[in-house]
């Protein structure tokens, strides 16, 4: 299957608009048997998705990806692999040169690859940690050295706080920005960041378009792990709207993000191949043109909007 692609900023990588995030098949949202988890990347590649993102933070995601790749003889030509540094469970928040080199080497070893296409600094949680990323000899300097050595192809920042993304944009040294949680039907506060990053030449990866399952289609009140989620009320509002109009909420959620041409791709998680197929089908499903003005009016009027703090408040 030939899927629509977009150029990811100045990296010149042509990535599929919908790509696979490794959070879910890694088990971060609940246990997933390994045999089922392996079908997520397998089905993604089979369907033509060419970008998979993972992280040491996502439980067994890197390990499982490595085991899967071993069965197929390595990473396929023409596809892109992304992982992260700074959030390995044993060295969380270590953005030093030594910690960064250790993390990258460990990820390569676990996944059984010699290099990756994208390496993102992951989840600095406070200004002290972000300062360490940018400090002389810190994570950014180290990743640039690793890029020169051929270990990675591009450098990005993946985190929630908007102020950290703005710092990254201002340096002019990051190729990519991964924003999550703040650009979806329930919250759009990352829109100015996306604009700024794109206009500076950075590629923009938008994660969480279906909100960890909140906007996946079923009534989110029926999903036990979501019962205390701060965005539940907003998700229920969108679910009721979609039900009343007999439209696929997952399709609306994914396609709304992709209507912004300054988004390079959206990462959608999948626990297995079935979910991967469902997510991709929703991204390509025809929707009536008439719904989009209504969606935008709902957003403007505050309906279906979360009142929980987002990355702009961090």
Image: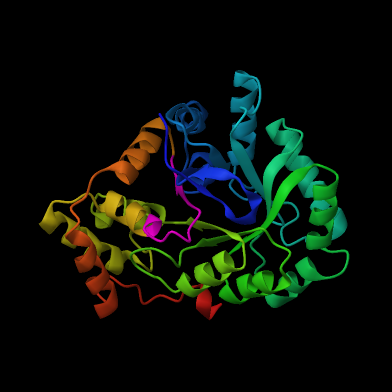
Taking 134 as reference, is 298 left or right? Answer: left
| Residue 243 visible, this angle | yes
Classify 259 as above or below 131. Answer: above
| The stretch drawn in magenta includes residue 267 | yes
Give how far across and how far down residue 120 sits, in percent. Answer: 67, 54
**Quadrant placement of the C terminus:** bottom right
Taking 313 as reference, is 246 left or right? Answer: left
| The stretch drawn in magenta includes residue 218 | no
- Which contiguous range is marked in magenta? 257-270
> Could you tell me how many numbered marks the image carries?
0
| Residue 88 visible, this angle | no
Q: Nearer the viewer, residue 12 or 163?
A: 12
Task: Identify the residue at horizontal 83%, vertical 70% (top origin).
Answer: 135
Colouring mode (rainbow / by chain / secondary structure / one colour): rainbow
Classify 91 as above or below 15. Answer: below
Q: Nearer the viewer, residue 101 or 31?
A: 101
Task: Identify the residue at horizontal 49%, vertical 74% (top origin).
Answer: 192
Quarter of the view holding residue 72: top right
Give how far across and how far down residue 44 sits, in percent. Answer: 46, 33
Q: Nearer the viewer, residue 35 or 121?
A: 121
Task: Identify the residue at horizontal 18%, vertical 53% (top origin).
Answer: 288
Taking 257 as reference, is 100 left or right? Answer: right
Give how far across and how far down residue 87 sits, in percent. Answer: 68, 55
Give how far across and how far down residue 259 sits, in percent. Answer: 36, 58
Task: Identify the residue at horizontal 85%, vertical 44% (top origin).
Answer: 149
Classify 203 as above or below 108. Answer: below
**Quadrant placement of the N terminus:** top left
């Amino acid at each position: 299957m030939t899927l629509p692609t977009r150029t990811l900023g100045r990296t010149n990588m042509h990535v599929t608009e919908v790509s696979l995030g490794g959070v879910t098949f890694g088990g971060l949202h609940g246990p997933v048997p390994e045999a089922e988890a392996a079908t997520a990347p397998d089905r993604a590649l089979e369907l033509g998705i060419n970008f998979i993102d993972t992280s040491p933070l996502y439980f067994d995601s890197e390990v499982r990806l490595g085991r899967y790749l071993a069965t197929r003889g390595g990473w396929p030509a023409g596809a892109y692999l992304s992982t992260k540094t700074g959030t390995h469970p044993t060295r969380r928040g270590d953005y030093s040169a030594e910690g960064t080199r250790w993390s990258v080497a460990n990820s390569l070893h676990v996944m059984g690859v010699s290099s990756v296409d994208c390496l993102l600094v992951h989840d600095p949680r406070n200004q002290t940690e972000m300062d360490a990323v940018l400090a002389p000899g810190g994570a950014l300097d180290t990743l640039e050295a690793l890029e020169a050595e051929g270990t990675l192809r591009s450098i990005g920042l993946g985190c929630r706080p908007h102020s950290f993304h703005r710092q990254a944009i201002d340096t002019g040294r990051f190729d990519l920005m991964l924003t999550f949680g703040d650009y979806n039907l329930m919250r759009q506060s990352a829109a100015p960041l996306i604009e700024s990053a794109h206009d500076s030449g950075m590629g923009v990866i938008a994660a969480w378009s279906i909100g960890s399952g909140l906007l996946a289609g079923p009534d989110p009140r029926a999903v036990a792990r979501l019962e205390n989620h701060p965005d539940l009320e907003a998700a229920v509002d969108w679910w009721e709207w979609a039900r009343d109009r007999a439209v696929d909420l997952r399709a609306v959620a994914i396609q709304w993000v992709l209507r912004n041409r300054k988004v390079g791709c959206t990462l959608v998680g999948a626990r297995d191949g079935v979910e991967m197929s469902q997510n991709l089908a929703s991204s390509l499903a025809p929707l009536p043109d008439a719904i989009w003005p209504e969606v935008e009016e709902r957003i403007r009027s505050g309906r279906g909007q979360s009142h929980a703090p987002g990355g702009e408040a961090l």
